[in-house]
Image (spheres, helix red, strand yellow):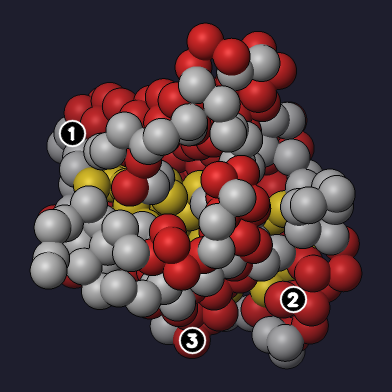
Amino acid sequence: MTTPRGARVALVTGAARGIGAATVDQLVADGLRVVALDSCAGDGLATRGDLEAVADRHGDVVHPVVADVRDRAALDDAVTWADEHWGRLDVAVAAAAVIRGGQPLWKTPDDDLDLLWDVAAKGVWNTAAATVPAMLAGPDPSGCRFIAVASAAATHGLFHLAAYNATKHAVVGIIKGLAADLVGTGVTACAVSPGSTKTDMLQQTAALYGVTTDALVEHQLTRRAIDPTEIAAAIAFCASAAGGVVNGTVLHADGGFGGSGA
């Protein structure tokens, strides 16, 4: 199939599973072509097989790229591929993430903080730096959207997750600064903050605390785990033409995280 050069194009990081994979599925359903990027590092993270499975279910409207968001040159290459093959880039979704924690701040290893900063915060920065110039130079900047996946931890202080909290707060700061830099261009930037969502990361978080995922879900008013497709729907709205109204701010798709229901 030949891809229409007028079709909107997205780049999604952390695309091999969880929220990232669900976002690829939703954007394709909405008619977008997607460059699906993931480190595929394994060892608790997604694998190359996970990414290939996402791409295989969509044929040639999804282009898989094995790359790390810590590698700015690799992100630049992915954007160049989109421009050369599909003629544009309209949407970027920075969904790549890792989880580390389980100890108070003063006992948290420097390596944990460094990894979280490099992937969760600087990874968003790198993704924006690689994608936004292509959006500004493209055929429809007013329809272009940059969306970062933050977290309820970007608003709340979570027990024994100080480094994760810090980096997710940084994500929101990056988004607010980016949106201010984009004033008058038509391109917008926002963050979506999920609550406890049915992903491998939720299971890893529960393991850090030595509890079940059901115990984590009790922290949100819905009293159930959010499905990744629900977060993908929120991201897809932000990626849409109407979603430009969510600019320089956070869409809290967290099921009422931190509420005080009976």
Q: Earlier in the sequence, mark 2 or mark 3?
A: 3
Q: Is residue 180 left or right of residue 37?
A: left
Q: Nearer the viewer, mark 2 or mark 1?
A: 2
| Type of amino acid under label 1 | Val
* Residue found 72% across the figure and 76% down from its top: 54
Location of the C terminus (image quadrant) = bottom left
| Type of amino acid under label 3 | Ala
Q: In this figure, which residue is indicated by the disc labeled 1?
A: 183
Q: In this figure, which residue is indicated by the disc labeled 3?
A: 29
Measured along the vertical axis of the image, is residue 21 above or below residue 110?
below
* x, y percent for residue 40: 81, 53
Callout 2: few (<14), some (14-19), or many (20+) C-alpha neighbours within 10 Å?
many
Q: Earlier in the sequence, mark 2 or mark 1?
A: 2
* x, y percent for residue 99: 60, 41
Q: Nearer the viewer, mark 3 or mark 1?
A: 3
Measured along the vertical axis of the image, is residue 134 above or below residue 101?
below
Q: Which of the two residues, 98 or 192, is positioned nearer the viewer here?
A: 98
Q: In this figure, which residue is indicated by the disc labeled 2?
A: 55
| Alpha carbons under labels 2 and 1: distance apart | 35 Å
* Residue found 46% across the figure and 69% down from its top: 214
- Residue 136 visible, this orientation: no
Q: Earlier in the sequence, mark 3 or mark 1?
A: 3
Check whether the beta carbons of the residues at disc 2 and disc 3 lie within 8 A of each other. no
* Label 3 secondary element: helix
* x, y percent for residue 114: 64, 18
- Residue 221 visible, this orientation: yes
* Residue found 65% across the figure and 12% down from its top: 110
| Alpha carbons under labels 2 and 3: distance apart | 13 Å
Q: Which of the two residues, 28 or 166, is positioned nearer the viewer here?
A: 166
| Alpha carbons under labels 3 and 1: distance apart | 30 Å
Measured along the vertical axis of the image, is residue 16 above or below residue 209?
below
